[in-house]
Amino acid sequence: ETGVTQTPRHLVMGMTNKKSLKCEQHLGHNAMYWYKQSAKKPLELMFVYSLEERVENNSVPSRFSPECPNSSHLFLHLHTLQPEDSALYLCASSQDGGFYGYTFGSGTRLTVV
Amino acid sequence: KQEVTQIPAALSVPEGENLVLNCSFTDSAIYNLQWFRQDPGKGLTSLLLIQSSQREQTSGRLNASLDKSSGRSTLYIAASQPGDSATYLCVTTSNTGKLIFGQGTTLQVKP
C-alpha cells in the first residue's frame, strides 16, 4: 500500500448507472486530487481539494461530481457517464503544496458500457 | 509554460545491464522533481524525490540526478532485472504546486 487507498480497483457501469469512487489517505496530507488517465495519454488533472475546499476544477463535465468530507477522504460521484469516460482514475495527496512530493493511489479502472 | 520531455520513449535491455533514463524540462523554477514507476493499469509508485536544492538522491539500485541550470534529470538503474519492467515517469512540481508529467519511458528488461 502506498498510503493512499482507492476502492474499488475495478468498476464496470452502464451509462445510466450512478456509482462512486472512494479515496482515503492517512498520511496527514492537506490536499487531495483526482486525475484521469486514458489509454496512451498523459494524466489529466480533474479536481484539487486543499484543506477540504475545492480549489481547482479543470473543465470537467458535470457528470463527474467530487466530494471531500474531510482531509482524509475524497469521493468522485459518477452519473450518466459516456463510453469515452472509460479510463484509469487516480487519486493523489500532498502536503504543503507538494514540497514533499505527491503520493498516488493504485487507481480505479473504470469501464463504461 | 513548463514542458517535460523523456527520452527514450521505449527501451529494451537484457537483464543485468545498467541503464539511464533521461528527462528534460524547460522551466528551471521547480519546487522539486519526482520519478515514478507505473505498471500497466496500475497507479504511480514514487521512486525518488529530488528537491530543487539537491543534486541527487539514491535508493537501492536507483540513483536520480538533477541539474536545474541545464533543465535535466537522469534516472540510473543499476543491474537491471525483469521486475524493473514498467513505465517510468519524470514529474516536476512548480512553485505553485502544479505537476507537469513527462510522457514516460517504457522499459522492458529481458531475462
Image: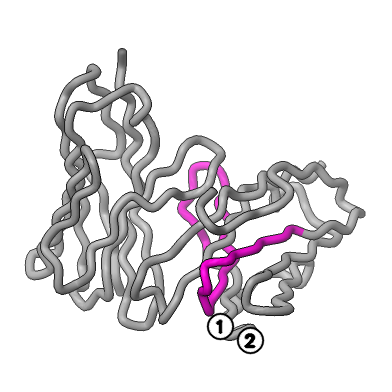
Q: Is residue A4 magenta?
A: no
Which residues are drawn in magenta?
Answer: A21-44
Q: Position of residue A100 (x, y in %)?
A: 35, 71
In the picture of the structure, the residue carrying the numbered disc 2 is A53
Mark pair 1, 2: CA separation: 5 Å
Residue neighbourhood size for the residue with mark 1, other residues' Cα within 10 Å, grouped as few (<14), some (14–19), many (≥20): many
Residue extending farthest to the top is B111
What mark, if any, has residue A29 been given in the picture?
none
Mark 1 in CB contact with mark 2 (< 8 angstroms): yes
Q: Position of residue A4 (x, y in %)?
A: 57, 58
Q: Position of residue A88 (x, y in %)?
A: 61, 48
Subunit bearing disc 2? A
Residue B62: image quadrant is top left
Q: Is residue B82 rendered to the left or right of residue A109?
A: left
Q: Relative to A42, is A53 above or below? A: below
Subunit bearing disc 1? A
The tally of labels here is 2
- Quadrant location of the C terminus of chain A in the rendered image: top right
In the picture of the structure, the residue carrying the numbered disc 1 is A50
Q: Is residue A28 magenta?
A: yes
| Residue at position x 27%, y 75% in the image | B31
Q: Relative to A52, is B61 above or below? A: above
Residue extending farthest to the right is A16
Camera-nearest residue between A112 and A5: A5
| Residue at position x 31%, y 16% in the image | B110
What's the residue type where badge 1 is placed? Ser
Q: Secondary structure at mark 2?
A: strand
Q: Relative to A85, is A39 above or below? A: above
